[in-house]
Amino acid sequence: MFNSLSDRLTATFKNLRGKGRLTEADVDGTVREIRRALLDADVAVPVVREFTAAVKERALGADVSQALNPGQQVVKIVNEELVTILGGETRRITMAKYGPTVIMLAGLQGAGKTTLAGKLAKHFKSQGHTPLLVACDLQRPNAVKQLQINGERAGVPVYAPHPGVSSEFEEATGDPVVVARNGVSEARQKQFDIVIVDTAGRLGVDAELMKQARDIREAINPQEVFFVIDAMIGQDAVNTALAFQEGVDFTGVVLSKLDGDARGGAALSVASVTGKPVMFASTGENLDDFEVFHPDRMASRILDM
Amino acid sequence: LSQDKIDDDVWDEIEETLLLADLGTEPTLELVDNLKRRVKVEGSRDPEQVRRMLKEELLALVDPTMDRSLADDRHDGRPSIMMVVGVNGVGKTTTIGKVARVLVAEDKDVLLGAADTFRAAAAEQLATWGARVGVPTVKSDIDGADPASVAYEAVKAGIDQEVDVVMIDTAGRLQNKVGLMDELGKIKRVVEKLAEVDEVLLVLDATTGQNGLNQAKVFSEVVKVTGIVLTKLDGTAKGGIVVAIQRQLGVPVKLVGLGEGPDDLAPFDAQGFVDALID
Ligand SMILES: Nc1nc2c(ncn2[C@@H]2O[C@H](COP(=O)(O)OP(=O)(O)OP(=O)(O)O)[C@@H](O)[C@H]2O)c(=O)[nH]1
Ligand SMILES: Nc1nc2c(ncn2[C@@H]2O[C@H](COP(=O)(O)OP(=O)(O)OP(=O)(O)O)[C@@H](O)[C@H]2O)c(=O)[nH]1
Ligand SMILES: [K+]
Ligand SMILES: [Mg+2]
Ligand SMILES: [Mg+2]
């Protein structure tokens, strides 16, 4: 399990065997290596700072174990801390007690929301639920059509009273907040038990669009608001996550494009600064490429092990 | 509030600024080392002066002298051929719409080719952009058609119609997917039966972290990238990964994306980019 980072750490500990406890000097070199590994994995600078301080503290107090060399021992501590921040056990989706369960998706442009909407729809349908998709992105060209095609592929109907921007309709018509509200009413009337609301991509600094997202949230009172974030994101993960936390107050995180080779340090950044659990991983462009998030696998991936 | 010496806090702050801009650990450490050396040699004592030096070093890395123009003129009796490539969701299709808008404003005839036959509604999205900026789009009516054939048809139509520029949109693909990268290589090879591809633009999302370097490496290997478009710079991300990309691969950033509208495109400005990186 422990190679690469562990090997490098083992090298920094060469002269250490036989000592009873790890000293400050021993640990400093290690912490430098860990810091480097986390930064290379795109974990955000302030999160790295906090994290390495916590690891240092734990490592300093630790007895040198018989079974592991000191390098491995520190990596074990790092791994445990990572898993803890990443959420330990995964939480399940909160379902409504009465009426349909409403799930809203939000995130930056191109993060993978519309694709995820299709994935969730298909997933719930296969579990015997009756989901309805709601098309609230009236702004990105052909976003409504994209959701309709995903709905078709998932075998799930799409509530789309407005076509959004397309070659026939140059200007956006309709109000996303109204569409969201009516979509949920429609689901209630026609007895769908899950509503998945796709929204337009928006930047954390776009106050107007962020307010629109908040208005959608207030209009539909969702059980879950998923913040969809691209696993390739770098240091901006913190700004963005905090902006969406304040803007729409999301309840869970979905990490997308994990089928790539990015190390995905954003998972740690977002979980750490928002305290919200990463619930799912999106792992491809097809509607089946979707799984429960595994904190332990993510920890290994971030550490490149 | 200038101190009379450059202490560790100043160095730490500089290092953090660079890391926070996604410059990456290696370029950051190298830059800081260079600066330390310069400070020692030049005997600087003012943190402000060190910041100025930092800007100079960064600017030298970003290299304002690079040729960042687009190959967008007809030549040898045929149109200029551009391909737009990159990972999923970075802004390829949108960028094509914006570039086409600029070309149209320069009185050029442009034709778009919808070689993303995979993603839901991708061809429609490109055609909407085409309609928006007043240029036609060649697309297939068949879902999942062979992207290389669509690209070929678009280039053929562009040659027959004697347009100035043909722009080919491709599906987003992650660079670690060998099959999809092979497909991209094939699109280019098939097009080159008709005409050499003059410009391969790699679209890179400014929020991208260290993976951006891998993206640039692999796409360059497969389709020989000639320029980068750095999108979504209207957000809080700085796009510092392009510094490492330019340095390692010598591929210049040519354009930047600054929003979702048709006019939200600008030429890359090295000085402005460096200023934004560290402010
Ligand atoms: N490889 C991979 N691609 C993905 C994944 N999720 C989404 N995509 C792709 O990423 C691109 C953007 O996905 P969308 O679902 O359109 O993203 P979005 O957040 O709805 O985008 P906007 O509505 O424009 O903000 C598309 O090419 C998708 O096919 C994933 O998990 N892995
Ligand atoms: N804020 C901002 N959004 C942008 C910019 N460029 C593109 N976008 C948005 O990013 C999202 C994805 O853009 P697309 O052009 O569909 O990206 P793509 O690379 O073609 O995506 P795929 O074909 O699915 O891989 C859309 O919501 C665009 O409106 C930009 O410069 N700034
Ligand atoms: K992205
Ligand atoms: Mg979408
Ligand atoms: Mg596209």
Image (cartoon, coloured by chain):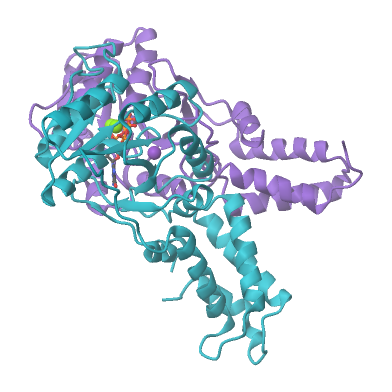
Chain colours: A cyan, B purple
Task: Using the image as rendered, state which of residue A173 and residue A18 is in the foreground.
Answer: A173
Residue B197, relative to residue B10: is it above or below? above
Q: Residue at x 26, y 42 (%)?
A: A116
Quarter assignment of residue B276 = top right
Q: Please state if B240 lies on the left or on the right of A304 as rendered.
A: right
Quarter assignment of residue B162 = top left
| Quarter of the rendering occupied by the C terminus of chain A | bottom left
Q: Please state if B279 lies on the left or on the right of B48 as rendered.
A: left
Residue A7, relative to residue B163: is it above or below? below
Residue B144 seen in the figure? no
Residue B6 seen in the figure? yes
Q: Please state if B242 lies on the left or on the right of B44 as rendered.
A: left
Give the x, y percent position of residue A80: 49, 70
Residue A305, relative to residue B250: is it above or below? below
Q: Residue at x 53, y 39 (%)?
A: A239
Give the total number of marks visible in the rendering. 0
Give the x, y percent position of residue A283: 28, 52
Give the x, y percent position of residue A284: 25, 49
Location of ligand 3 given as a quarter of the image: top left
Q: Residue at x 27, y 26 (%)?
A: A180
Q: Looking at this rendering, what residue extends furthest in the right direction?
A: B4
Q: Residue at x 60, y 68 (%)?
A: A55
Task: Using the image as rendered, state which of residue B175 and residue B162 is in the foreground.
Answer: B175
Give the x, y percent position of residue B193: 19, 34
| Quarter of the rendering occupied by the N terminus of chain A | bottom left
Quarter assignment of residue A197 = top left
